[in-house]
Image (spheres, rainbow, N blue to C red):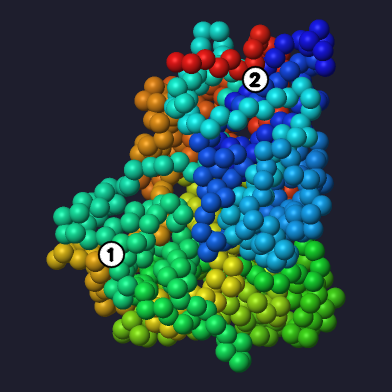
Amino acid sequence: MSTSETVGTSSIAIIGAGPRGTSLLERITANATELLPRGRLLDVHLIDPYPPGGGLVWRRRQSPLLWSNTRADECTLFTDDTVDCEGPIVPGPAIDEWAARLSRGDLRLPDGYHPSPESVAEAARVHAGWFGTRSLVGDYLAWVFWHTVRTAPPQIHVHVHPALALDVCDLPSGHQRITLSSGKTLDVDFVIQAQGNIPVRPLADGERLAREASTHQLVYIPPASTADISLKSISAGEPVIVRGLGLAFIDTMVLLAEGRGGRFERDLHGELHYRPSGREPIIYAGSRRGVPYRCKFAYPLSTPYPVSPRHFHLVALEGKRLDFATDLWPLIARELTEAGYRELANSHPDRLAMDTTRFLGRLSAVAWNTPEFKELIAHAVPHREDRIDIEAPDQPLMGHRFHDHAALQQWMIEYLAADLERGRNPRHSPHLAVYHSLVSVLNTLWTVFQNGWISPGSGDQGIPAFISMCRFLTSGPPSPRLEQLLALTRADIVRFLGAGTEVACRDGHFQARSRSVDTVVRARALIEARLPRRVFSRTTDPLLVRLLERGDVREETLLDPSTGRRHPTGAMDTADGHPLRSDGTPNTKRLTANPGDFPRPRTNAPFLRQSDSVARTALIEVAGKASPAGGAETQR
């Protein structure tokens, strides 16, 4: 395009170049041809101190013992024909297909991208059920970023700024001025904040434990991403209390065992055992639930699960002001329950005491949880292990009390073995159908939130309880990791504390107790195995600190109807994606985009829908504006 044909330059800055920032760039390049005036140039600036693509969490230099928690065939940053968005669909490979092409040597490597030798070697082993290392995922994200740059329309110029954004302020000209840690400022037409995980100071409990640890010369490791902490201070053979049983715990467990020279080996019967190196500590692990999240399934459904829900769909909800307990939960529960029973009937008809066609017909005709529904299940599904109890508490230790830790340990071994069996044996595929149905339900629920029919911060206590249940059912470890945890438990390297674990510092030691057992565990080391809670008022991110101090942003709060008080949610308060100032007015020159879960292919992923919506809003905003220099950069 010649200079005479251009009609000015617009500019957009994306703060954060991790998965969300990369997805936003892809959606901007996909929508630009439609939304930018002919001849308009667009400068897109990506600001992040870490290399683009993976950002901080998925950076390519990490221990190979740290895995992604999502299968390679379930990770993508590309849209497909299931994604309900206004922008064009631009297909691309999920991680498994990308890895296969990389290992075959038929993947085009764009300028700026150079795969690591370790990722090339791992790519040759990847299959659909593979849980890639975080380094491999970081390599994939880096490729997506530079592939997007290479395939962008010619009027788009992408600029990478390896720096922190220290401040963003409104200029009288209508531009946004970004101050960078490199000593430069950047003036742009529009800003998208896509920072992902933000650094925060410990909460009051963490600050107190850190002070007491310093006083008594104890080891206290506060909440953080496992890749960002050092475990060298954890002594071999000594007890260490680990609070948290999510992904950070699994990472910590592996680094303290296999990372210290231990080995996992199978016996002649195929059972996994752990051979210690002698350098491991004794890990006492507990949490609010006292058990890990349910492990991932290692097998597929025999038939693809439909993307759109049968009952919990927008037509049934549209135009109403909704209450979760009365309007949403009955439809969600019916959706999940019916999904499990349909899979039971279709894949395991021998376990029904009724003709399959008759059973499915009656299942569709009766409402969930009515006397007719309960009678049908009692008659047609004789085996208790085949019944779908969606109202079962997501706290399996509730109501259990043990006389000592040995009894709790034996219960946990049996619980972990049963969960591993559920995740590996297709006999339990009805629970996998519930999992897939839950994904489609969450996608619809995201649209309900986006349309304002019900708010996550509305004070409806059913919503956080449901989200907690969803995490329990969907966010667990890969089954190979759960098998390793079971081996470490049998080897007495990992010992469990129980539900409702509480930790205090007394008599010069950390002490842990729980509701499950009376015994108290003492240790000189405590690891908080979880990410820090997002509380904007405690952030140390320099940009957010400045914006909060100036009143340019505020934190969304949740109303507790029992007290009438509002509590911070850890999310920025927005209106249509625009951040709200302290006085409640939106800043229409800025948008925010939440981190979100890694999008799965062919699931109409909310992550991709939000990226498309934010990208289109930004492009529409700058389409009518053109500056002499799209994103003027100056030295301070």
Name the residue at the bottom extreme: 268
For the point 67% across and 38% down, the residue is 112
Q: CA distance from mark 2 to mark 1?
A: 50 Å
What is the three-letter code of the residue carrying label 2?
Answer: Ser
Instruction: State which quarter of the image contains the C terminus.
Output: top left
Relative horizontal placement of residue 553, taking residue 347 as reference (left or right):
left
Task: Report x, y in % for residue 367.
Answer: 70, 64
For the point 41% across and 63% down, the residue is 244
For the point 72% across and 34% down, the residue is 149
Relative horizontal placement of residue 583, taking residue 67 as reference (left or right):
left
Look at the picture and state if 271 lies above or below 302.
Answer: below
Task: Report x, y in % for residue 197.
Answer: 49, 43
Is label 2 in a helix, a strand or a loop?
Answer: strand
Q: Nearer the viewer, residue 587 or 628?
A: 628
Residue occupied by mark 2? 11
Instruction: State which quarter of the image contains the N terminus.
Output: top right
Task: Report x, y in % for residue 175.
Answer: 56, 14
Look at the picture and state if 34 lies above or below 220.
Answer: above
- Asked whether residue 323 is in view, the answer is no
Residue occupied by mark 1? 525
Q: Earlier in the sequence, mark 2 or mark 1?
A: 2
Q: Nearer the viewer, residue 483 or 142?
A: 142
What is the three-letter code of the residue carrying label 1?
Answer: Ala
Neighbour tally class for label 1: few under 14, some 14-19, many 20 plus, Cα within 10 Å: many
Neighbour tally class for label 2: few under 14, some 14-19, many 20 plus, Cα within 10 Å: many
